[in-house]
Amino acid sequence: MIEPDVVVVPAGDALLGDPPRTEHVNIFAIARRPVSVGEYAMFVDATQHRPPTEWEQKRRTSGAALEGVSWADAVAYCRWLTVGTGRIYRLPDEREWEKAARIQGTLEDLGVRREWTNSWQNGGRVLRTGADPAARVLADDDIATVGFRIVRGMTGR
């Protein structure tokens, strides 16, 4: 089991959202890169979790960022990593994701891919994208370009 390369983001106030507002965000460690196909393959092989669509084709690109996973799949991966490592892994809330995305050089592979967060708004899960770190996107049925990165908890949650 391979733990992700994380960067610690210190606690403090951050200017977040649109329109911008100051919010306090606790300390956390976020993965520099989204979960890769290869990392997710270890999870699928170990747990027999149902793989995403077109899995055999995706599996040939083990270093690429994983796409096409549901929120529940991402949470199951976090749970598996937590049990296997003894550290708490989870999806970032949207404040954590945005704070990390706004710090130059913290997150790699930000782009048009949408990423799961653990936040809920207006009856749906919130996705974030590097195309506009302040923009909230609510999840819909199209998860073809949805991936995730994970947070290692540092405050006991």
Image (cartoon, rainbow, N blue to C red):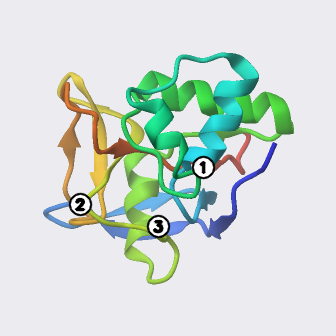
Label 2: element kind = loop
Query: Looking at the rendered structure, which numbered label has been put on residue 17?
Result: 2
- Total number of numbered labels? 3
- Residue 59 seen in the current view: yes
Q: Indicate whether 39 appears above or below 79.
A: below
Q: Quadrant of the C terminus?
A: top right
Q: Residue at x 46, y 42 (%)?
A: 58
Q: Residue at x 83, y 32 (%)?
A: 84
Residue 42: x and y in percent read: 71, 36
| Residue 156 quadrant | top right
View extreme (left): residue: 19
Q: Residue at x 80, y 41 (%)?
A: 87
Mark closer to the observer (2, 1): 1
10 Å crowding of disc 1: few (<14), some (14-19), many (20+)? many
- Is 90 left, or right, of 73 in this rendering? right
According to the picture, the residue beneath numbered tag 1 turns out to be 151
Q: Amino acid at mark 1?
A: Val
Query: Looking at the rendered structure, which numbered label has been put on residue 100?
Result: 3
Residue 18: x and y in percent read: 16, 61
Q: Amino acid at mark 3?
A: Ala
Q: Indicate whether 154 appears above or below 81.
A: below
Residue closer to the observer: 157 or 125: 125
